[in-house]
Each structure stands twice: as structure tokens, then as C-alpha cells.
Image (cartoon, coloured by chain):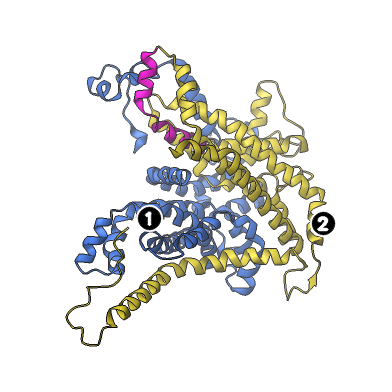
Chain colours: A blue, B yellow
């Protein structure tokens, strides 16, 4: 979306823009070659490693060894084809990552909005204390609890090497942030809505279902996207809990890279394909992700 | 909030069962309300208890026992695990590494992020595309970024050594990741590459909150671009920078994925972090007591730093922003 912002070279002369933007746009508009040169360097450094990986996947190991900094010549498709073949483990990893991320997101959003509702819109004794429970939860990163989590989940909860065993703790550690973001969001909805619903005979639960849920779509999407990306990229918890066929993409990438360390081109192809889902998701959800992060910073 | 939604419709004309009825209704409504609150909050609380509270309590419990991970904990050793963790050079080095990453990340990313954000905050061609590109590394999994950089940093055959050779330099014999003196700094550089986009995006968002009138007024007074940035933009960005610093610090203290992929904590423990230490002790060596004690120490360090940051740095915001 914002990636296609129209060129603004004429902003100074464009009367419509000048009137809204004022003097800043006119005299501080970027045009200097130095600015573009710096921007180009930034882009090269940022994208260089990623592009090198993508192109490396199109080369053979012999090409990579002969001239590490070269371009594919000829272009080799075998590496990518091998990763995408029907019997490749890639698809299993992909499936596991997807299911775990979807379950994590669903649990976080449903439990989060449910908890945020009374905390935002009921008046009762102990409300702030209850909210503090979630705020304090922010202080406990998953890393601190990772070893006992590993033992509890495999031994006591019998969820070792399952999708739930990863999704539920991920959701639990994402909940505090979710509630902290959603509560002010729900508080901001006007009181009149609730009064009107009451006059129409709706109970508080009816109000939750029919009015609050539809209105809090944007808030839920924001926390949902954050939870999804967090789960999709997670490594530590899956590393301890998942083995064999149950592994997720980050585990698959790491293991592929250490098991096929001689096959650099194959590693590049595997890694490139593994980053595509996250990139596509990001491009589609860019606004939401950025909004969510800003919300987190302000909150 | 709304007028107390004590009950449904007011007690109607059906008041046939004596004068105590309204109070009973009120009590029934209060119970109903409590039941609703419980219904809404219980799932979240149950999840927190099962997967956050119990594990953390177990970590504390583990830290007081000598335990190999199965059967009941019986071998109570008091604080001996803590003594052993805190006198273990690998762990104290890990703490130092974490602190280097905390400080190094902020010292590198703050000026770079600020410079790029100021640069991008002007009308220029391709601005939207630039913003998207700069955010790409942040969206990639740390593991994926790590695997790519691991290949780039291969000694001799990696592209970085090749490029260095092309300009007549050569990297260390064992590679940047294989040489103890360079390994941690290399990890820091890769982390900067990965997380700079977050700083830029947050700073850009903060810049959008700076009202145009301020710039206009400054320009009417004849201020140069640099003066405007220094006197107006950067001070107004203060709250954003301080909050970003907090996030960055908390993330650095938990650093695991990138180190695990790039070096595994080596060479010669040159890049261990508290997280890699406790995972190593817990999973590879089955020293759960030690892992528990290390977890508690990690938590305490993070908490103390968070509170100190809150007190000395973030508190400025509440004072300034209060009125």
C-alpha cells in the first residue's frame, strides 16, 4: 500500500499539496543527490544479504565456491525444485508453522478480548488489581520460564511434541500484551453505545457479542497479527518441544543448514523459500504490524 | 462509565412478594455480574496460571534443589545453585555479553536509526518503498536471518571475506564468527542489521506527531534544516526514543536465537548469553537446578534494569507529559 506512494517530485509546485503541507514540504523537500545516495546505501545493506540468499539459491555449489560474489550463470532451478518437491520436508514444516501460528493467534485474540471486556467496561471492586495481574505478566519473558515449561509440558501436561504444547504457552505469554493493548481500545468506545443497547434490552453479554466484537475488529486484527508473526518466527520453545515431523519452519531451516552444511546453494534455496510466507504476510499486513508496534510503544 | 447497570428493568408492578424483593434482585444482579466477570476472565487467567505462573514457580523451586529432571525434587541444596551459577565464569561472562549487547545495540541503533528516520522524513521519491525495505529484516525470523548471515560470514568462501579480499583486506583465519575476539562484535553487527528497521519505523511514527506549525515557525525565523532537527525534532522524539530503548534492552537481555544459530555460544564461550547458558544447562547437561537458578538470576537482572530504566529514564516522560 504505502509502498506505492506516488512520486512527489513536484510537491513544491503542486498548489493542492503546497496549501496543505505548508513551507516544510517546499524548502525541506529531499531532492539532493546526497540524500538519494545515502538512501541507496541503506537499501543495499538492508536487502543485500537477503538478495544474496535468493540469488545463491539459483546457483550451483560449484558456482558459489568459484566466485562467491558472482551472479547465477547459468541459472540453476534444481535447488528450489528440490525444496519444493512433494516429498520434501519443507511442506510438513510449513504446515506445522501454520497450524501453530493460527492456534496461537486464535487463542490470544479470543481469550484476550474476553478478558479485556470486563476490565474495560465493568465496574467492580478489584478491577485495577486484576488488570495489574496482566501488567505484571509483561515482566515475565518466556525465556525465564523456558526450562520448567519444557519439563511441565512434556511430563505433567503430556503435550510434548504436539501443536498445542507450543501454541498454548505462546498464547499465554502473548496475553498480557494483548490485554494491555485491547483494554484502552475497548474503553475508548463511547458509553452511549452501551446505554442504547441497554435501552433496547440487550444484556451485557448481548452487548459484547453484537456490538463490541464487531466494533473492535481493528484492535483484534492488530493483536492477532503481532501474535501470528511472533509465533511464526518463534524458535526457542519449538526447539525444546518439537522433534521430527512436528518441527516448524525455523527449526527446519536451522537443521537443514547444519545437516547440509556442504550444500550451500541448497541452504540458500531452503532459507529463501522459508522467508517468503513471512514476507508476503508482512506486505499484506504492513499497516497493522506497524500500528501494533506503535501501540505497544505508546501503551 | 455507565450508570450502574445494577439489574434489568426496574422492579415492576409484579411486586407481590413483600418489600424485600428489590434488595434480593439487586443481590441476584450482583451475583450475575460477578459470574459474567468470571466467565470472561477465567480462560485468560487459567492460561496464565498453567503456562506462566506455574513454570515460573517451578523455576524458583528447581533452583533450590539438585535435580536431574525426573522424579520428585528431594535433594534440597538451599542457595548452593545460586552460588555455583554466580561464581561460574561462563555465566558471569554471559551476563557481561548480554550487557555489551544491550549497550552496543542502543549505541549503534539510536544514531543510525535517527539518521535514517530524519532522512526518510522528507518528501522524496520512493519514500514508501524505502520504508518497506528497511523493515524487511525485522520481519524475518531471527533464525532465518541468522542462517543467511552464517553463510555470508563463512571464512574464505563466504561473500564477506571475498569482498574484503577484493579490496585487499582479509578477514581472520577462523572467520569472524570463529575468532573469540571478533565473534561477539559480529553478532552485534548482525543484530543491528536485523533490528535497525524497528527503530526507524518507530522514530518515523514519532516524527509524524511533530506538528507542521513548529517547522513553519522555525523556518520563518530562518532556522536551517540541521537547527530544526536538533532543536525541535530530536527533543520531541524523546519519548519515542526512550520507549524504543526500553524494548531494545529487554530484547537484548533475552537474546538467544541469533547466538544459537551463529555461534552456539562459542568459540570458547565468547558469545554465550544468559539464555544460551540456561538452555545448555537444562537440556544438554540435565543440570536443572543450575538452569533454574540461572533463570531466576536472569529475571532479577531484567527486572532491576527495567525498574532502573523506568525510574531514571522513562519517568521523565510522565513528568513532561503530565501537564
Q: For residue B26, which quarter of the picture?
A: bottom left
* Helix, strand or loop: magenta stretch: helix
Q: Which residue is mark 2?
A: B84
Q: Chain of mark 1?
A: A
Residue B190, position as x, y percentages in the image: 61, 37
Q: Residue furthest left?
A: B13
Residue B208 painted magenta: yes
Q: Is residue A226 visible?
A: yes
Q: Residue furthest top?
A: B222
State the residue at coordinates (57%, 46%).
B142
Q: Of residues A43 and A203, which is closer to you in this image?
A: A203
Q: Chain of mark 2?
A: B
Query: Is residue B315 rendered to the left or right of residue B43?
Result: right
State the residue at coordinates (57%, 33%).
B109
Residue B224 painted magenta: no
Query: Is residue A190 rendered to the left or right of residue B60?
Result: left
Q: Of residues A70 and A76, which is closer to you in this image?
A: A70
Amino acid at each position: 500500500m504505502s509502498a506505492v506512494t506516488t512520486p512527489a517530485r513536484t510537491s513544491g509546485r503542486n498548489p493542492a499539496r503546497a496549501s496543505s503541507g505548508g513551507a516544510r514540504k517546499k524548502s525541506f523537500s529531499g531532492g539532493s543527490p546526497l540524500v538519494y545516495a545515502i538512501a541507496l546505501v541503506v537499501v543495499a545493506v538492508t536487502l543485500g544479504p537477503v538478495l544474496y540468499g535468493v540469488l545463491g539459491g539459483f546457483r550451483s555449489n560449484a558456482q558459489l565456491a568459484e566466485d562467491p560474489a558472482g551472479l547465477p550463470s547459468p541459472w540453476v532451478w534444481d535447488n528450489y525444485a528440490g525444496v519444493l518437491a512433494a516429498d520434501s520436508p519443507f511442506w510438513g514444516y510449513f504446515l506445522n508453522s501454520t497450524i501453530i501460528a493460527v492456534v496461537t493467534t486464535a487463542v490470544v485474540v479470543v481469550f484476550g478480548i474476553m478478558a479485556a471486556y470486563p476490565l474495560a467496561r465493568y465496574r467492580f471492586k478489584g478491577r485495577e488489581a486484576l488488570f495489574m495481574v496482566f501488567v505484571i505478566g509483561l515482566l515475565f519473558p518466556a525465556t525465564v520460564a523456558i526450562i520448567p515449561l519444557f519439563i511441565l509440558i512434556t511430563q505433567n501436561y503430556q503435550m510434548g511434541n504436539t501443536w498445542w504444547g507450543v501454541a498454548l504457552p505462546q498464547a499465554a505469554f502473548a496475553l498480557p500484551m494483548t490485554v494491555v493493548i485491547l483494554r484502552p481500545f475497548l474503553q475508548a468506545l463511547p458509553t452511549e453505545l452501551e446505554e442504547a443497547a441497554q435501552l433496547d434490552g440487550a444484556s451485557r453479554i448481548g452487548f459484547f457479542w453484537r456490538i463490541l466484537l464487531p466494533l473492535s475488529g481493528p484492535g483484534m486484527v492488530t493483536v492477532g497479527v503481532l501474535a501470528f508473526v511472533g509465533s511464526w518466527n518463534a524458535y526457542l520453545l519449538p526447539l525444546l518441544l518439537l522433534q521430527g515431523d512436528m518441527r516448524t519452519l525455523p527449526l527446519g531451516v536451522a537443521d537443514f543448514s547444519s545437516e547440509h552444511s556442504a550444500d550451500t546453494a541448497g541452504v540458500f534455496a531452503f532459507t529463501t523459500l522459508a522467508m517468503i510466507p513471512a514476507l508476503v504476510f508482512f506486505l499484506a499486513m504492513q499497516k497493522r504490524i506497524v500500528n501494533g508496534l506503535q501501540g505497544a510503544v505508546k501503551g | 462509565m455507565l450508570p450502574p447497570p445494577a439489574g434489568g428493568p426496574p422492579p415492576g408492578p409484579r411486586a407481590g412478594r413483600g418489600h424485600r424483593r428489590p434488595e434480593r434482585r439487586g443481590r441476584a444482579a450482583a451475583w450475575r455480574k460477578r459470574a459474567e466477570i468470571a466467565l470472561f476472565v477465567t480462560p485468560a487467567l487459567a492460561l496464565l496460571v498453567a503456562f506462566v505462573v506455574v513454570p515460573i514457580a517451578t523455576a524458583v523451586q528447581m533452583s533450590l534443589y539438585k535435580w536431574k529432571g525426573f522424579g520428585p525434587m528431594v535433594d534440597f541444596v538451599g542457595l548452593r545453585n545460586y552460588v555455583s551459577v554466580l561464581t561460574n565464569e561462563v555465566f558471569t561472562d554471559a551476563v557481561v555479553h548480554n550487557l555489551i549487547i544491550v549497550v552496543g545495540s542502543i549505541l549503534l541503533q539510536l544514531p543510525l536509526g535517527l539518521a535514517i528516520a530524519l532522512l526518510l522524513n522528507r518528501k522524496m521519491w520512493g519514500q514508501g518503498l524505502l520504508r518497506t525495505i528497511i523493515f524487511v529484516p525485522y520481519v524475518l525470523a531471527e533464525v532465518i536471518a541468522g542462517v543467511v548471515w552464517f553463510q555470508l560470514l563463512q571464512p574464505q568462501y563466504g561473500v564477506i571475506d571475498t569482498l574484503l579480499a577484493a579490496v585487499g583486506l582479509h578477514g581472520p583465519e577462523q572467520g569472524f564468527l570463529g575468532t573469540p575476539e571478533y565473534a561477539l562484535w559480529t553478532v552485534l553487527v548482525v543484530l543491528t542489521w536485523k533490528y535497525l528497521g524497528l527503530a526507524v519505523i518507530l522514530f518515523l511514527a514519532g516524527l509524524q506527531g511533530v506538528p507542521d506549525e513548529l517547522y513553519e515557525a522555525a523556518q520563518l525565523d530562518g532556522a536551517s534544516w540541521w537547527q530544526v532537527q536538533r532543536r525541535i525534532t530530536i527533543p520531541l522524539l524523546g519519548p519515542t526514543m526512550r520507549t524504543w530503548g526500553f524494548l531494545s534492552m529487554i530484547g537484548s537481555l533475552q537474546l538467544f536465537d541469533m547466538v544459537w544459530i551463529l555461534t552456539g555460544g562459542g568459540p570458547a564461550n565468547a558469545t554465550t548469553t544468559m539464555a544460551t547458558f540456561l538452555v545448555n544447562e537444562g537440556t544438554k547437561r540435565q543440570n536443572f537446578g543450575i538452569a533454574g537458578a540461572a533463570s531466576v538470576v536472569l529475571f532479577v537482572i531484567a527486572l532491576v534494569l527495567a525498574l532502573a530504566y523506568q525510574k531514571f529514564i522513562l519517568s521523565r516522560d510522565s513528568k513532561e507529559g503530565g501537564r
